[in-house]
């Protein structure tokens, strides 16, 4: 039975009618889902690894300590090293203070700002992270609206609100909460820039792209991709094209500059956005990750022994990263055939959920503390999204409009996995692409359903 518009108006809580109010409602539902997830699933979930690092780094930042290496400061450490056939014990005392650039700074700054306002416990910061996750829902909705229509925007926002592989990160205190929002914002700004490369849009795109790079370094790749697309495709004078691109790059550099300058000043070896590449490479290029059950993944023991100076003295983070990076490169050089034929395919397969996916979900649960039941729900949703996303990519390609701004995260995530290791959360930015492409298919199906049927020829 259909409800008349007059009766609809008399309902005690009528549904919102405008795009903005509907988008806010979807975001509110997404926020409620995330808060319930934190309270009933994550509240007793112990932190480890990067998540623990971000939690302590945020509190240290709030205390005015800047960006020290948080785990060494909080817990110290004891390492055994061998020098000249003699075994030495090297102690790192609790309170050891040294600068870090292991991760770009945005997530630490965000959590640290709320820690300064009083959110210093794990649960408080989990709630903050869950609420910050709502930003992604809003941005994806606005991106979908500007891409095609308001209806598409609402579909995109609904998928972002309910897709478990998006909200599973919100509350884990991992940087994916900020990086997925930055990826969506970069696509949104890039869409506007590639459609209409005015000076204002160029500057905004550069600023958003720089912000994304300060969340996860590999997100910076989107900036040259879309600026190159503008350079070769737009029918504006060449000097104008170069001017717009220069403005975009300059805006990004202005935002990146303080962090880069700080890194160049405080470390012995040159560091730009982050210096964790050596650690990632050494832990993902070793015997356990080239053969057996962990092929294509990483193992923390592959980074041992920890690098120290000739007499057991501490090295700074950039020096340690340089040493372990060289270890990794030596191993890669001796195992190139295995890397190309088995390891890289396994890395990509793990990230895209096609190589031993159940084992990968278990590893996500053990290492990244992702709840296994939620991961299984997310994987089922992911399998549903894939065919819809492929169809959406075809539809967007036929429109000859903005395909790169939407889909570029897919090759970027794939390259990231290929050169590092396979991990479900490394697909985080690409989830934005999958959501929007799937929403395009759903929107097209709805349009077809609501098209009026034409009467057969010759009928009266």
Image: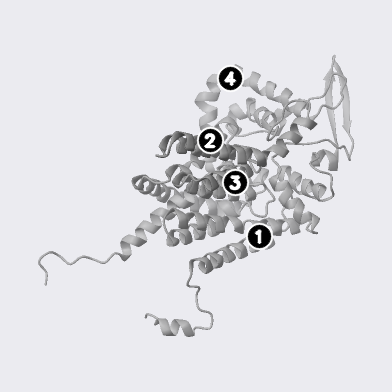
Secondary element under disc 3, as helix, strand or loop, is helix
Q: Nearer the viewer, mark 2 or mark 4?
A: 2
User: Which of 424 and 120 lies nearest the eye of the viewer?
Assistant: 120
Specify the quadrant that holds the N terminus.
Answer: bottom left
Q: Quadrant of residue 247?
A: top right
Q: Compute the Cα span from label 4 to label 3.
A: 39 Å
Q: In the picture shown, does residue 28 fall above or below 199?
A: below
> Does the image show residue 342?
yes
Checking the image for residue 208, the label placed there is: 3
Does residue 363 show up? Answer: no
Answer with left or right where residue 188 lies relative to residue 398. Answer: right
Disc 2: CA contacts within 10 A as few (<14), some (14-19) or many (>=20): some
Structural distance between the alpha carbons of marks 1 and 2:
31 Å
Depth-wise, is mark 1 or mark 4 nearer the camera? Answer: 1
Along the viewing direction, whichever of 330 and 103 lies nearer the viewer:
103
205 vs 84, nearest the viewer: 205
Residue under label 1: 131
State the separation of the CA atoms marked 1 and 4. Answer: 45 Å
Residue carrying label 2:
224
Measured as percent of width and height from the top left, residue 190 is found at: 51, 45
Q: What residue lies at 75% left-to-right and 25% top-to-bottom?
A: 269
Relative placement, left or right, of 321 versus 438 is right
Q: Dot 4: within a 10 Å radius of its alpha carbon, few (fewer than 14), some, or many (20 or more) residues?
A: some
Mark 4, secondary structure of its residue? loop
Residue visible at 44% across and 61% down in the picture = 150
């Amino acid at each position: 039975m259909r409800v008349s518009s007059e009766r609809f108006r008399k309902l005690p809580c009528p549904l919102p009618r405008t795009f903005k109010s509907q988008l806010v409602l979807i975001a509110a539902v997404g926020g409620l889902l995330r808060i319930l997830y934190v309270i009933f699933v994550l509240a007793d979930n112990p932190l480890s690894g990067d998540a623990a690092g971000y939690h302590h780094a945020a509190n240290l930042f709030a205390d005015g300590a800047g960006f020290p290496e948080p785990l060494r400061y909080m817990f110290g450490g004891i390492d055994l090293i061998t020098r000249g056939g003699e075994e030495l014990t090297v102690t790192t005392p609790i309170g050891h203070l040294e600068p870090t650039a292991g991760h770009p700074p945005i997530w630490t700054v965000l959590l640290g700002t709320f820690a300064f306002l009083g959110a210093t416990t794990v649960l408080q910061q989990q709630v903050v992270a869950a609420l910050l996750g709502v930003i992604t829902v809003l941005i994806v909705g606005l991106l979908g609206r500007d891409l095609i229509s308001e209806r598409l925007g609402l579909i995109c926002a609904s998928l972002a609100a309910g897709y478990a592989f998006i909200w599973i990160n919100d509350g884990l205190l991992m940087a994916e909460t900020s990086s997925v929002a930055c990826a969506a914002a970069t696509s949104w700004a890039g869409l506007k820039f590639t459609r209409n490369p005015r000076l204002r849009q160029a500057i905004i795109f550069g600023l958003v792209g720089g912000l994304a790079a300060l969340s996860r370094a590999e997100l910076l790749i989107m900036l040259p991709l879309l600026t190159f697309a503008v350079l070769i495709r737009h029918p504006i004078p060449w000097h104008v094209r170069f001017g717009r691109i220069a403005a975009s790059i300059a805006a990004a550099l202005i935002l990146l500059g303080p962090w880069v300058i700080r890194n160049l000043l405080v470390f012995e070896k040159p560091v730009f956005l982050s210096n964790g590449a050596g650690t990632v490479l050494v832990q993902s290029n070793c015997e356990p990750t080239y053969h057996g059950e962990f092929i294509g993944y990483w193992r923390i023991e592959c980074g041992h022994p920890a690098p120290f100076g000739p007499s057991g003295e501490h090295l700074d983070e950039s020096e340690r990263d340089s040493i372990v990076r060289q270890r990794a490169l030596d191993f890669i050089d001796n195992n190139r055939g295995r890397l190309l034929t088995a390891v890289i395919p396994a890395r990509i397969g793990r990230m895209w959920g096609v190589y031993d996916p159940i084992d990968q979900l278990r590893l996500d649960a053990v290492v990244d503390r992702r709840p296994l039941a939620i991961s299984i729900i997310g994987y089922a949703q992911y399998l549903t999204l894939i065919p819809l996303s492929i169809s959406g990519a075809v539809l967007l390609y036929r429109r000859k409009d903005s395909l790169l701004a939407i889909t570029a995260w897919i090759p970027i995530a794939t390259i990231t996995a290929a050169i590092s290791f396979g991990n479900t959360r490394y697909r985080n930015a690409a989830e934005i692409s999958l959501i929007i492409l799937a929403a395009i298919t759903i929107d097209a199906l709805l349009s077809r359903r609501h098209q009026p049927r034409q009467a057969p020829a010759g009928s009266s």
